[in-house]
Amino acid sequence: MPTSLLTLSDHVTQLTIAPELGASLVNWTRLNDGWPLLRHSDEQALASANPRRLACYPLLPWSNRIGGGGFDTPAGWQPLTANTGHEPLPIHGSAWQQPWQVVNTTSDSTVLQLDSQQPFPYQARLHVQLSDGRLSLTLQTTHMGDQPTWYGLGLHPYLTRTAQTQLQATAKGVWLCGEDKLSQQWIELPNTWNFEQPTQLPEQLVDNAFTAWSGNARIIQPDAGYQLVCQAEGTDVFLLFCPQEQNFFCFEPVTHPVNAHHLEGHPGLHLLAAGESRQLRYSLHYQAIAG
């Protein structure tokens, strides 16, 4: 069955969304020439019905991987199992693997909602807005269970990468990971991963959480004549994923480092009681620049 798409537009950009596929963004393009501002999703990617082949999807009730078969809560142990066929650990929560409902929509905005029971009861809302080339995403979750538990939020945009793509984002530290891809050690930011000034993306694999982030970033595409000015509210962590020899990378605003459920102090996680909510805002503003 074909996936139903919503189409939003302003006078600068156009966005398609697949609510049934985990509230995924499918394509965000520049109107005048169709250039992909997020990674292009072709017909095969859409037909796969896999959000990880599309342009962006929400992460909750946690981001990235959790080890140990689950995590402890004030009410006891919360068991988790792997939720994909290719990852040994549960990854990115459950919201991306469920169909969302359309609450309302206009020509340039929509509100989507998910009422989930997995792995515990929660409600999520995603508000998407286009305005003058700015894509704004507001992700909110409310705990609906009787017993308190830990929550994390994030967004997982896949961005276009060329040989000239540059990133500017200030952070003070980074979590190093072991072979299991779980956070192992926090260190002060090394020079090789310092993006305080606009810097080309590393050729080597990067898949790490950066901390003490200001919430501001720029993704600069000189050969395509534009930059995306990014702003996040509700977090000071981003995860940078740069796979080798690929035409995309991921710059993910997330509330916590990988496997925070098993790190001392649960950094970036929120213990929510019944009816309590948390929110994450993120915007990417398209701006033309001289090539």
Image (cartoon, rainbow, N blue to C red):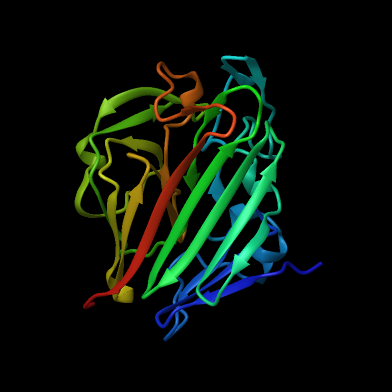
Residue 232 percent coordinates (x, y): 35, 50
**Image quarter hosting the C terminus:** bottom left
Q: Quadrant of residue 226?
A: bottom left
> In this view of the protein, which residue sits in the foreground, 272 or 200?
272
Residue 136 percent coordinates (x, y): 42, 61
Q: Residue at x 62, y 30 (%)?
A: 89
Residue 151 percent coordinates (x, y): 52, 32
User: Residue 23: in sight, yes or no?
Assistant: no
Residue occupying the far left of the picture: 197
Residue occupying the far front of the picture: 275
Q: Is residue 79 above or below residue 52?
A: above
Image check: 240 left or right of 111?
A: left
> In this view of the protein, which residue sits in the foreground, 192 or 95?
95
Image check: 59 left or right of 170?
A: right
Q: Is residue 199 above or below residue 65?
A: below
User: Residue 115: in sight, yes or no?
Assistant: yes
Residue 72 percent coordinates (x, y): 58, 16
Q: Residue at x 41, y 51 (%)?
A: 281
Q: Residue at x 25, y 40 (%)?
A: 171
Q: Is residue 93 above or below residue 129?
A: above
**Image quarter hosting the N terminus:** bottom right
